[in-house]
């Protein structure tokens, strides 16, 4: 048994399936991938782009915040589309980080600061204070 339909944002196909062996029902999501994308880390190491890793990072920053999951999904999709339509097959990890920072800044200031604390490698409390102060000054 299979039921297929596009997701709300049209970026994936949602398929409802049933296991022929045990009868359990489950959902899969199929996404169109325009090209193979490679993330280039700061030390030069390369790894394939993984949407799940991007989703996980953003979800951690947004944990216990009043943000609807669909808004997080839309942000992830927007970043992925931006990467895919850049025309590049390789993208610097710091560029992806900046895209996430920009998206979170518009979404939630606490999530933005949380992500920044890892992305910018805060090591002391004063790092948080200075960054939070700059966010407050921007009116976020």
Image: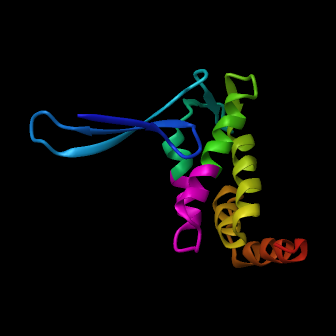
Q: Residue 39 appears at what percent x and percent y? A: 63, 32
**Residue 67 highlighted magenta (yes or no):** yes
- Which residue reaches farthest right? 137
Magenta-drawn segment:
56-74
Name the residue located 70 percent from the left edge and 31 percent from the top edge. 91
Q: In which quarter of the image is the N terminus?
A: top left
Q: Residue 29 appears at what percent x and percent y? A: 42, 38
**Residue 105 highlighted magenta (yes or no):** no
Q: Residue 137 appears at what percent x and percent y? A: 90, 76
- Left or right of 86? Residue 2 is left
Q: Quadrant of the C terminus?
A: bottom right
Q: Which of 65 and 5 is in front in this view?
A: 5
Q: How many marks?
A: 0
Name the residue located 67 percent from the left edge and 56 percent from the top edge. 119
Answer above or below: position of 105 versus 136: above
Answer above or below: position of 90 versus 132: above
Name the residue located 67 percent from the left edge and 73 percent from the top edge. 110
Q: Which colour scheme is used?
A: rainbow
Is the stretch drawn in magenta largely helix, strand or loop? helix
Q: Residue 78 appears at what percent x and percent y? A: 67, 44
* Quarter occupied by residue 103: bottom right
């Amino acid at each position: 048994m299979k039921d297929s339909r596009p997701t709300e944002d049209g970026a994936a196909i949602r398929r409802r399936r049933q296991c022929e062996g045990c009868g359990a029902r489950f959902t899969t999501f199929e996404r169109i991938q325009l090209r193979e994308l490679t993330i280039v880390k700061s030390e030069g190491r390369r790894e394939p782009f993984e949407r799940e890793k991007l989703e996980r990072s953003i979800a951690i920053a947004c944990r216990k915040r009043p943000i609807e999951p669909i808004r997080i999904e839309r942000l992830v999709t927007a970043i992925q589309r931006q990467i895919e339509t850049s025309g590049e097959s390789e993208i610097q990890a710091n560029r992806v980080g900046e895209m996430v920072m920009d998206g979170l800044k518009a979404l939630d200031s606490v999530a933005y600061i949380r992500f920044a604390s890892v992305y910018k490698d805060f090591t002391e409390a004063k790092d948080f204070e200075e960054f939070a102060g700059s966010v407050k000054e921007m009116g976020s």
